[in-house]
Amino acid sequence: MQSIINDIAEQMAQSPDKGIVASYIPQLAKIDPNQFAISVALPNGEIYSAGCAQTTFSIQSVSKVFTLTLALGKLGESIWSRVGREPSGDPFNSIVQLEHEHGKPRNPFINAGAIAVADAIMQGHQPKETLAEIVQFIRFLANDESIVIDEKVARSEVETGTRNASLAYFMASFGLFENSVDAVLGTYFHHCSIAMNTHQLATAGLFLANNGINPSTGYAVVSPQRAKRINALMLTCGHYDGSGEFAFRVGLPGKSGVGGGILAIAPGKASIAVWSPGLDVIGNSKLGTEALELFASKTGWSVF
Ligand code: DON
């Protein structure tokens, strides 16, 4: 395993086209694109890393996997009255479907869907309380108390997030929100701004590769059926309008973020986190996807 990922990191370092860092969040535009990391966490507790696996990055939309998991824990299946389970085929920040579909977002991974999930998990609490719960949950999954929100990134998102505000107000206009739009947006922007490294992220995803059980604690985070379903959503919706392409090239459930991170799950085998900040035109990590494609072909791991 170590030599497989060393080879991949070496190949990625030599790649001439590293993609383009997200610029619509000013704080992310400052990140050096010449960085790459990969970590592979196995259910037996072994973890292998190559590249800058101790460098933290903004997990952005990868956080939506954890907020969905929390929402399922709090609300059970009733969360599906707030958000759908179909791929959107549209960009992550698109508003078009909301008007025809009564303000109900297609899935929990597009921005509108994750904002609706944030509203659902708040249950009348303040953003601070909800965020403390989200961060605590991720620390527990990663078995690492040092994980925090990057306040600079969060502020940068609050200051420039007019599209997300539009999505939130549009959904609220259907009478669907239980909390104030400002409070929901504050929660959403801050959970997207959680900073992690690939070592922490791969560890946090292990429950999805291990029938819902966190192997470091032996604690059942979710039932095996729920783990399967979260993986199914990652496969079909985790890369937005690039989900089909990711399934075609990599063949594993995956969730990307505009910070350049991707969490991929090989059920029964491993949780894999990659990070490279340069993105493709859809907004998914360019080298991260290439690295996972190589990894899947070298290991033969696939859900197909
Ligand atoms: O709301 C946003 O636009 C960001 N906080 C998250 C978007 C994102 O990560 C899309 N992923 N590729």
Image (spheres, rainbow, N blue to C red):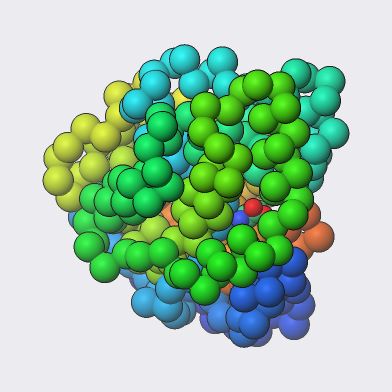
The reply, left or right, for residue 282 in relation to residue 154 is: right
- The residue shown at (43%, 47%) is 127
Residue 292 visible in rendering: no
Viewer-side residue, 166 vs 10: 166
Viewer-side residue, 86 vs 150: 150
Image x and y of residue 103, in percent: 72, 24
- The residue shown at (24%, 42%) is 214
- The residue shown at (58%, 21%) is 82
The reply, left or right, for residue 291 in relation to residue 141 is: right
The tally of labels here is: 0
Q: Is residue 224 above or below residue 111?
A: above
Image x and y of residue 292, in percent: 57, 58
Residue 14 visible in rendering: yes
Image x and y of residue 297, in percent: 57, 54
- The residue shown at (80%, 38%) is 95
Q: Is residue 72 above or below residue 42?
A: above
Query: In which quadrant is the C terminus drawn?
Result: top right
* Figure quarter occupied by ligand 1: bottom right
Q: In this view, does 110 lie above or below 270?
A: above
The reply, left or right, for residue 297 in relation to residue 122 is: right
Quarter of the image for residue 278 reads bottom right
Image x and y of residue 187, in percent: 49, 48
Quarter of the image for residue 287 reads bottom right
The reply, left or right, for residue 95 in relation to residue 286 is: right
